[in-house]
Structure formats: structure tokens, C-alpha cells
Image (tube, grey):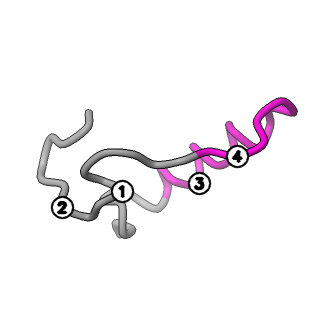
């Protein structure tokens, strides 16, 4: 299943896991068409 950013839920879990394992990462943001919700196949790859 895909989330509101057009990513597979498993991919989002992987991204969050990697970022969470880095003590210096305090926050993360989504930019571009995926953040706006107007992404298409191949957007922001």
C-alpha cells in the first residue's frame, strides 16, 4: 500500500528506521511534488 507521499509503506518504515538510528538527525522534511501531493510516476526519483 502507498502512503500520501506515494511511497510504499515498507519504504517509509525503512526511511524512518534509518533516520531514527542516526543520533544527529533531529528532524526530516519532504520536499517537491511528493510533499505537495501532486507527484506522478517517476517524480522526485
Please report the residue visible at 26 percent of the width from the left and 33 percent of the height from the top: 45
Do the residues bearing badges 3 and 4 touch, measured as CB atoms within 8 Å? no
Classify 27 as above or below 36: above
Which comes sooner in the sequence, label 4 or label 1? 4
Task: Tell me the crowding category of disc 4: few under 14, some 14 to 19, or many 20 or more residues within 10 angstroms, Cα based.
Answer: few
- Whole-number angstrom distance, CA of label 2 to CA of label 3: 22 Å
- Whole-number angstrom distance, CA of label 4 to CA of label 1: 15 Å
Q: Which residue is mark 2?
A: 38
Give the secondary structure at mark 2.
loop
Classify 1 as above or below 25: below
- Whole-number angstrom distance, CA of label 2 to CA of label 1: 8 Å
**Tag in front: 1 or 3:** 1
Q: Residue 32, image x and y in percent? A: 30, 45
- 26 drawn magenta: yes
Q: What's the mark number on residue 13?
A: 3
Q: Which residue is mark 1?
A: 35
Q: Which residue is mark 4?
A: 27
Q: Is residue 10 left or right of residue 26?
A: left
- Whole-number angstrom distance, CA of label 2 to CA of label 4: 23 Å
Give the secondary structure at mark 4.
loop
Span colored in magenta:
10-28
- Whole-number angstrom distance, CA of label 1 to CA of label 3: 17 Å
Task: Tell me the crowding category of disc 3: few under 14, some 14 to 19, or many 20 or more residues within 10 angstroms, Cα based.
Answer: few
Residue ranking furthest to the left: 41
Which comes sooner in the sequence, label 2 or label 4? 4
- 25 drawn magenta: yes
Q: Residue 37, image x and y in percent? A: 26, 64
**Tag in front: 3 or 4:** 4
Amino acid at each position: 500500500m502507498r502512503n500520501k507521499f506515494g511511497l510504499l509503506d515498507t519504504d517509509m518504515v525503512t526511511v524512518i528506521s534509518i533516520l531514527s538510528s542516526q543520533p544527529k538527525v533531529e528532524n526530516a522534511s519532504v520536499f517537491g511534488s511528493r510533499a505537495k501531493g501532486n507527484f506522478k510516476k517517476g517524480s522526485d526519483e
